Image (cartoon, grey):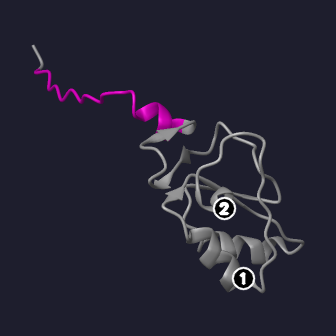
Amino acid sequence: MAVMKDETFGPVIPVMKVSGDDEAVRLMNDSTFGLTASVWSKDVAAAEKLVERVEAGTVFVNRSDFPSPDLAWTGWKNSGRGVTLSRFGFEQFVKLKSHHIKDYPK
């Protein structure tokens, strides 16, 4: 299904029944995109382990869209370039410069 493999923007959450975690991860990663994904489970600890295997820059557990200003929002694969939100996003717009000065006593 295209809705499962393409980047879909809008109020859409595709749902697919799978036989287990391995199939879920395989299907989630079977895309050239990796912007955002969500994992839904009653067992949050198991969901967190699964999240580590998902090839997406932002992965939600038991929610689908809740950007936090403390967390980076980034895409993997062909999903965008760079980072928004958080200090990581801010630092992309800042050019750092260091000044090393030694002042001699008069």
Quadrant of the rendering where the C terminus is positioned: top left
Crowdedness near tag 2: few (<14), some (14–19) or many (≥20) residues, C-alpha within 10 Å: some
Residue at the disc numbered 2:
4
Q: Which residue does the image show at 60% across and 78% down from the upper left? A: 26
Label 1 residue SS: helix
Q: Amino acid at mark 2?
A: Met
- Whether residue 86 sits left or right of residue 80 in the image: it is right
- Whether residue 24 sits left or right of residue 78 in the image: it is right
Q: Residue furthest right?
A: 42
Instruction: State the image quarter where residue 16 is shown.
Output: bottom right
Q: Is residue 24 above or below residue 78?
A: below
Q: Which residue does the image show at 61% across and 45% down from the upper left? A: 71
Instruction: State the image quarter where residue 28 is shown.
Output: bottom right
**Boundaries of the magenta span:** 87-104
Residue at the disc numbered 1:
21
Q: Whole-Å distance between the Cαs marked 1 and 2?
A: 17 Å
